[in-house]
Amino acid sequence: SVCQDTYGRIWVASKDGVYLYTGEEFVPFTNADYRAHCMPVTQAVHLDADGCVWIVSAMGTGFYDIRSDRFTAIEELQGTVISDIDITADGTVLLTATSGIWKYDKATGSLANMTESTSFTPHMACVVSDGNLAFTARNNNIYLLNTTSGNIKSIRTDRPVASYEQIEYIEDSRLLLSDGIHEVCLADMETGKTESLIDEKVILNKAEVQCLLYEDGLY
């Protein structure tokens, strides 16, 4: 994934670590605390409301404060495999892991597992229009998590969704899902009905699937 910081630099997550594009060249991110807590294989980078860059690696997660040049590792999640990170409009940080959906409060440094009392394994997630979190699970359901109350609503779909590696909120209670290879579909969060957007015989490369997911209004 990529994100842009408040100075206009582009941050890129890669299998070889995090890189910054300065406008002229790509340079590796070499902060010592980051290198001590995170593995090179990086799943995601994300800018939060305070202008800090969150880094999710294969076995370590934390955020980098650009102004102070300080990387803060989330020690409680060290060694936890995190598949996704989402940040709501009010700045709430939500980390999706096999162990649950974790809510992190930067002001207090507290961490809470929002799905601790459930039996399913979360997979991929996205923030929807009302600030809540929609996520897929390994049991092939889609769930809607109220990030304030912790209430969870189950949405049973008419096709398995556990294999989908990307999920984005579109509009009108609809989600766009892709397996990153050849399948892209719409899922209605109200009815659970899905609609394939691409003939299953068509094989797309990952860049083409990401274009479908991330271009505003285009899918």
Image (spheres, grey):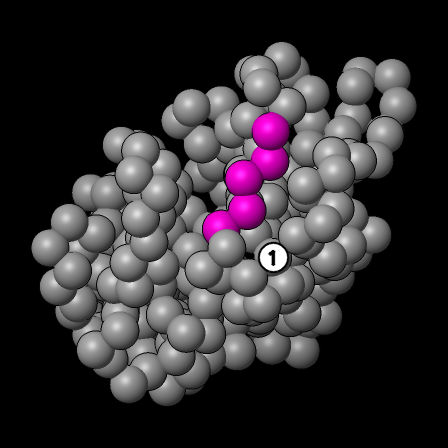
Q: Magenta segment, principal secondary structure?
A: strand
Q: 203 left or right of 155?
A: right
Q: Residue at x 17, y 67 (%)?
A: 152
Quadrant position of residue 72: top right
Which quadrant of the structure image shows residue 95? bottom left
Residue drawn at 17 percent across, 55 percent down: 146
* Mark 1 lies on residue: 60
Above-or-below relation of 158 to 77: below
Residue visible at 42% across and 24% down?
50
Q: Magenta residues, as a range?
A: 70-74
Observer-nearest residue: 11 or 128?
A: 11
Residue 142 point in image, percent of width and height: 31, 72
Q: Is residue 109 above or below residue 204?
A: above
Asked whether residue 72 is drawn in magenta, I would say: yes
Q: Position of residue 73 (x, y in %)?
A: 55, 47
Query: Quick check: is 156 in the magenta stretch?
Result: no
Question: Camera-side residue: 120 or 103?
Answer: 103
- The image position of residue 126, as x and y in percent, is 39, 53
